Amino acid sequence: IQSLRGIAICSVLFFHIRPDLFINGFLGVDVFFILSGFLISSILSRHEKLSLGSIIQFYARRFKRIVPLYVTVLMMSLMGTFLIFEAVDVETNLRSFVWSMVFARNIQQIKDSRDYWQQGKAHDRSVLLHAWSLGVEIQYYLVAPFIYALVRQVKTRTVRIVSYAGLSTVSFFFYLSADGAARFNSPLCRCWQFLLGSIAAEMAGGSYSAKNKATEKKYALLNDTERDNDKEALLEQPPDVEVVNSVMAYSKPVSQSLRTCLVVILVVYLASPFPFGERIGAIGVSLIVACLLASSDYEYHFMLSNRYLAYLGDISYALYLVHWPVIVFFGYKMETTHIDSWGSLITVIAITTFLTHLVHRTIEQWSLRTGYMSSAIYVGFMYTVLATLLLNSTRIEDMLMSQVFDNTTQVRIETTPGH
């Protein structure tokens, strides 16, 4: 899973840096949606029966995993917007911050009928253009436990797969029939991808069930604090082979060659110079990733066990949040709409790498280790500061403009003959 995340984030990063060369790179976001659906079903499958407490616990863990880092990057992006953008461009972006604070950037896109593909061109750069996908994920998370609870009423795996497929078909119909903005941003039009991940989780049920049991064995050795903070992280990491072998009831191993073919097809698909189009591209990459996940049996695979890809997967969330604002701010300062030189490329990658590691090793890792109350206090504080800055945005702009004017006047005076 981490290696697939690594492939997905590389795809998105290359697309945003050079969309003319990596024209299918945007499909990396579709990979994330499939992985999220797979993980949600797998995490919820730990519970024999979902209760109100387990659902609240699911939301709390998602909150701790997503929101602290998200609100931190929002703050960094807002400060960059005030300091780098001119007044008219600040005004253009402020509404996006308000919508993004409540994970509704995708809804704003639909409401304004904004075309994602046009917003990355010319001077219509939005610092939070990429936040639409976080909105889709969070909105799906709100209903995911209830969909899972409904489907789990059926005891037969085959019928559960058919149930997920039926729900996915309904969403897929909306995806095919919706207009551009809604098709790209609506959670209803994206549900089929999350549900496809759930189907893959059901099909990989034997091996993943074994992993759940292996995780529980590790989990039982932890104290209460460690158990609360680390259980989900344990689930997302490969378990000990010996433990899995001891508890696995059955498995349907897929040959290494077949899995290698699927990985190669996925990489070629994402890196292909030939445009597949939004719909065909999303369908193709979703099926490839779903097949890879469904064939999971946790045997070693030299590609999917690559430590460099896995590390990219570990930092993929931080990298996704950070990279786009860096690209936008750099392009704005350099007065260019794309990165067309080696110097610019190296600069953007260096800044992105530094900021990604900074927030990953500080805020992200801290939020995963700390308690729910500490995370909630931090998020509440950051949201308060964000709201205060947005409410006083006009005053802040005037202050910054006044400072720029004073500095410019001083420079002119100093360079005028006779002064």
Image (cartoon, rainbow, N blue to C red):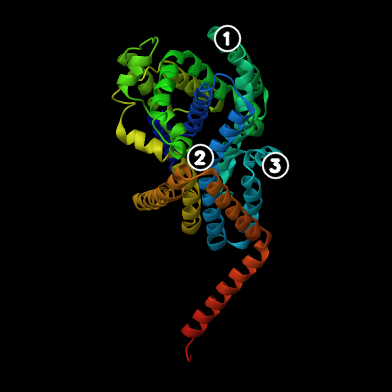
Please tell me whether mark 3 or mark 2 is closer to you in this view: 2
Callout 3–callout 1 Cβ contact below 8 Å: no
Residue in the picture at 58% in, 29% down? 54
- Residue 391 horizontal side relative to residue 259, left or right: right
Residue 66 location (% of width, % of height): 53, 41
Q: Earlier in the sequence, mark 3 or mark 1?
A: 3
| Picture layout, residue 377 above or below residue 301 | below
| Mark 2 or mark 1, whichever is nearer to me | 1
Query: Looking at the rendering, which quadrant does residue 180 occupy?
Result: top right
Q: Residue at x 61, y 58 (%)?
A: 385
| Quadrant position of residue 391 | bottom right
Q: Secondary structure at mark 2?
A: helix
Numbered circle sitting on residue 155: 1
Quarter of the image with the N terminus in it: top left
Q: Looking at numbered disc 3 in the image, what kind of residue is underneath it? A: Asp
Q: Amino acid at mark 2?
A: Arg
Per the image, the residue denoted by label 2 is 65
| Residue 172 visible in the shown view | no
Please provide percent x and percent y for residue 26: 49, 34
Is 39 placed above or below 385 here? above
Classify 71 as above or below 334: above
Residue at the right extreme, as displayed: 111
Mark 1, residues whose alpha carbon is within 10 Å: few (<14), some, or many (≥20)? few
Q: How many marks?
A: 3
Residue occupied by mark 3:
112
Q: Describe residue 403's horizontal placement relative to residue 334 as left or right.
A: right
Q: CA distance from mark 2 to mark 1?
A: 31 Å
